[in-house]
Amino acid sequence: MTEQEIQRIITKQRKFFESGKTLPVAFRKENLKKLYAVIKQNESEIMAAVKKDLGKSAMESFMCEVGLVLEEISFMLKHVSKYAKKQVVKTPLAQFASKSYKNPSPRGVVLIMSPWNYPFMLTLSPLVDAIAAGNTVIIKPSAYSANTSKLIEEIFTKNFAPEYISVVSGGRAENECLLNQKFDYIFFTGSKVVGKTVMQKAAQHLTPVTLELGGKSPCVVEKSANLKLAAKRIVFGKFLNCGQTCVAPDFIYCDKSIKDELIKNILEEIKKQYGENPLENQNFGKIINQKHFERLLGLIKKEKVVFGGKSDSQAQRIEPTVMDNVLFSDPVMQEEIFGPIMPILTFENIEECIEKVQQMEHPLAFYIFTSNKKIADRVISLIGFGGGCINDTIIHLATTQMGFGGFGESGMGSYHGKVGFDTFSHYKSIVDKKTWMDLPMRYQPYKKIYDKMIRIFLK
């Protein structure tokens, strides 16, 4: 798509937004219901597209893609009427004879740029929040997940007017064209490198942004943890979507005294969940493309592999791979892995663990397995991260009751549920002053008697 075509879409969307047609809650709910119905109608096609791109099974696609979007829509349909109402707040005595309220207003023309690893969910979930808040939206899906992105474009072209919701396909050229335009809000999910570019471009127009990035999310296993259960939940979180999850446990950081037992349980769980030969398990996904496949193979040190390590270049699949005796200086610890490789590192005591993680860049997620509540509370309080779990992995993002987002180097802003509505809204602060009286004390010429009265009001 050319820059002129993109500019025409933005112009049409701005005109449509300024007409006020997206403001009524009834319009928002109508389109949320329509989106829900369209997704249900195309459910099998969506799952087939995701299967082609990432090798996900139908159950995993529904659990981690389609189902989460449907849940977000259902939540918004239930609550958007309340969220869109003006919120009356207390008025200070100094502003007597007035009413104060916050008025949630849509931001305007919004750009949503989504990644390839959860190509349906991470495109549609923020879209749901943007629709609920009353915006028009331009969607830019990833070129890497070509099948899902093509289907998304077909669905919206067929069912929604382009002046309301439009999809721009393509790669870097289209990304650059979009980022050169003025939007009222940009929502980006992807890598830290591209996130910096998005923020730089947005700054030229003073456009606010939400950046959902990533990082090396630690999974700490303290010596009091239930190791069998910890292994089960760690294996699930790490190897879901073939490890291509922004909140996957990037590395295991465990107490030295329980490392061998933990590894034993992890290996047992991999075999239980993926079989003796995971490359033959058709429910285990694939790496998105050859570039990432080769990058991941370059992170595996064969002499440190205690399980897995095998790969199928034709199918772009890598076994769940566990590496022991890993050092923070190893290549696998120099970047976010984003694949089915599990490095295991150890600490002598929990204080050493805290100190080390505090020195690292703030991750998108953090996980700790422990039976000691005091240790859990201390670690959670002292370490900076986006969100996480105690005695589990990943599930904190699958709720409409809490915002999901990064912190520091892993991003800024959040969404899901009410927090998502707020992200795509601007709250106008309004004072409605009555006309039946007007206190004279704020006007010149100032009088001493008024000084005493002002001091009574402002104290």
Image: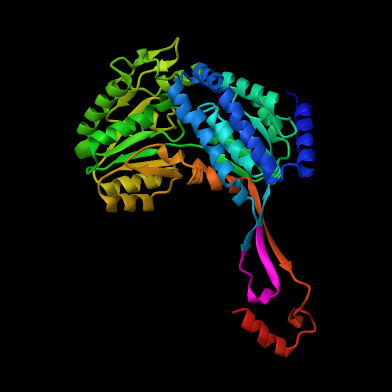
**Image height of 139 relative to 415, above or below:** above
Residue 347 included in the magenta stretch of the image: no
Residues in magenta? 89-102
Foreground: 274 or 289?
274
Q: Nearer the viewer, residue 198 or 319?
A: 319
Return the x and y of residue 20 as percentages of the image width and height: 76, 45
Locate residue 110: give its quadrant.
top right
Colouring: rainbow
Please give the name of the residue rendered at 56% of the width and 19% of the height, measured from the top-left corner: 45
Q: Residue 53 at x, y = what percent?
A: 52, 19
- Where residue 115 appears, x then y in whole percent? 55, 29
| Quadrant of residue 448 within the rendered picture | bottom right
Query: Is residue 271 visible in the rendered structure shown here?
Result: yes
- Look at 56% across and 26% down and name the residue there: 40
For the point 61% across and 21% down, the residue is 151
Question: Vertical placement of 153 versus 347: above or below?
Answer: above
Q: Looking at the picture, does residue 356 appear above or below residue 244?
A: below
Q: Is residue 305 visible?
A: no
Question: Where on the picture, by quarter, is residue 39?
Answer: top right
Q: Nearer the viewer, residue 73 or 391?
A: 73
Q: Quadrant of the N terminus?
A: top right
Q: Residue furthest top?
A: 314
